[in-house]
Structures are given as C-alpha cells and as structure tokens.
Amino acid sequence: MKIGLNATCFNNRPSGAKQRFIGLYGRLFKLMPDVEFVIFQPSDCDLEGWFSEPNVRFVQTPIPSEGRLLKFIKGFNFWDQALQKEKFDLFECFNIPTIKNKHGRTYQTIHDIRSLHFEPSKLKRLFSIYAHNNTFKKADKIITVSQTMQSEILKYYPDACVEFLYNGIDLDLFTSGGAQDSLILSTGLTLPENFLLAVGHFEDRKNYDMLIDAMKHLKDAHSHQALVIVGNDNGQKQYILDKLSALNLEENIFLLSNLIDEDVQLLYSLCSAFIFPSIYEGFGIPVLEAMAYEKPFILSNIEVFKEITENQGVYFEPLKVESIASAISKVCDNPAISRELQIYGKKRVQDFNFDFLAPALKRLYLQ
C-alpha cells in the first residue's frame, strides 16, 4: 500500500494542526511499517527532521506553507504530475481545497470551518466557500477533530462522509516544570506568585477582549488576579495592548509571544489555573495541556469544550463579563473545586494519548 500526504501547510510555527500531524502520524508510520508513506513538504520548511521512520519518503514542492491563493496557483500544475507519477492508493490533504487522487481514495483532514464564519473580507469568504465546496465534492472521506465539528460540517454538507478522530497529546512531554528563575531568565519577565494562563493566538475568536474586561471587573471588586496570555499575533495584539493601557491593567495582564516550548511548559506548570475564553474552536488542545499539568480549567461554554471535558468543567458565557469573572472566582477562591478539576483532568487526558488514537487512524485508512 502507498499513501501520500499533502503536508505543504505545515511550517515551524506552533499550531494544533502541526502538533497533531507530528504526534499522530509519527505513531501511524510505526503502526504500518509495510506501507510506503510519501510526505509532500512546502517550499519554505524542511519536514524531514520531524520523522525518521524508514517507510517515510519526502518530496520537495514549489508550494509555500502559507497563503491559500498562492498555494493554489503554485500547486496547479504540480499536483497532476506528482500524483500521476506516484499513483497512490490513498492521498490525504491537510489544507483545502482538496487535491483529488485519481488513482485511489482521497481523504481530507479539517480542523474547523471558521473561515465560513469569521472571514471579514468578502473576496476571501467567496474563495473559502468555493474551496470548501470543492473539497466536499472531491474527498471520499473527511476526518475532523471532534464530534462537535462533525455535526457542524454535516449541517453544511449533509451528504459528506465525515469521521471524527480527536486531537491528542504526547503525555511523555508533560513533566513538572523547573524553577521559576528559569522562566525569568528566558523571557525577562518576573511573574506574580499566582496567575491565570490563557494560550492562543491574538485574534477575534479567542475573545481576549471580554476576558480583559472580566479581569478589570475583578480588579475593581478588589480581587487582584493576574493573567498571562501566550500567543502569536494574528492581527489583534496591538488592540489588546492599547486596551490594557487604557484600562490600567499593564501590571495585571502580560502578553507573551514567540516563546520557546520550554517556556510555555513552565508557564503551564506555574499557573494557578487555565482559562480558555474562545467563542469558536474545532477542538482546543490547550485544554489537554492544562489537564496534563493537572491544572484546574475555566472554559467558555461552547459545545466542543463540554465534549472534551464531558461536562465536568467550570464554564462561563463567553460574551458576558460577569459570567467570566464569576467563573474565575469560583475556581480560584475554592480549593475544593480546583482540586476536583485537577483530579478529573488527570484521568480524562489519558483518553487523548496519541498512542491510543493512532490505531483508530489506522482503521480509518484501512476501511
């Protein structure tokens, strides 16, 4: 059997999709040693260091890792020739629009369909609609990352064949953090003794705007919580910085970008609780990371977070400041509730181990 993987969307930038690809597919390659895997890599990132299995071969492409339109243009002639040469039994894509495999099955992994909801540019939204329609027409099977996302996709495309396979986590990478001094030396930041942690890029759907208003609400009520937000800029960071200045919260809320993995791990280890205020997610890997570090978690009440945590978390209405503030107080001011969340999370996160998920992906490939 010969399987091709269109991995031209991946690069060195941290993302949940990249984490899934490395963790899940690295184990899949070991589970299917008699299968030849061919990874098509982008023009601007070398993926060969990510995997060392002998049944994996890499093909360089002219396709950049970012820019949907440019990827489409650069790949227009490339894919026909490459797929004609390789003749795959199965070809899986990780970005849309899907490349149709004319010699075998075509699979597509989709983490979410947020560009159908949150794309402000009319031209980009039209292209997104075209790309999604094209994908669901060409793909024999869609693999998505949660039951919530499976249901959402089927509302838009009821005739699609959609399976869900959760995102996962490599639990061996999650150990107790080192001394706080190590974090200070790396980032130049002196952290408060207790702080909430939020992880996610700076963009509208992450809902940091309302979270900051909730932190202001707590401060005005003389509840002096600190907050650290870790993420790269997706267009909203300067707005958040200006808001912190206007609300006089610069000594309470810290924004950190471009951190190395070790620093992010230390932040998880040192935080008093984790908070995720998003209004839309296909999954939510930081929830798993918080669980792995045995941290209490405070989550917006979107359906996918309830799915991941089996309705066992503390939730808030993401667009209501008082609800967010109340949930923070409920967890941070009640050690018993915090401990219950820690115990539950430690147990629940085992269900998302890549070693458990990889055999399920193998079964999807062999169907």
Image: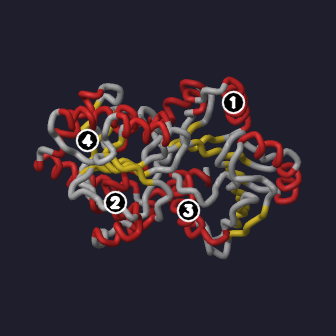
The answer to whether mark 1 and mark 2 are in CB contact below 8 A is: no
Label 1 CA crowd tier, 10 Å (few <14, some 14–19, many 20+)? some
Q: Is residue 227 left or right of residue 240?
A: left
- Amino acid type, mark 1: Lys
| SS at circle 1 | helix
| SS at circle 3 | helix
**Residue visible at 49% across and 41% down?**
238
The answer to whether mark 1 and mark 4 are in CB contact below 8 A is: no
Q: Which residue is mark 3?
A: 22
Q: Which residue is mark 1?
A: 124
Residue at mark 3 to residue at mark 4: CA–CA distance: 28 Å
Residue 1 seen from this side: no
Residue 242 is situated, as x and y percent measured from the top left of the image, at 43, 38
Along the polypeptide, which appears first: circle 3 or circle 4? 3
Depth check, mark 1 against mark 3: the one in front is 1
- Amino acid type, mark 4: Gly
**Residue visible at 83% across and 48% down?**
74
Q: Which residue is mark 2?
A: 267
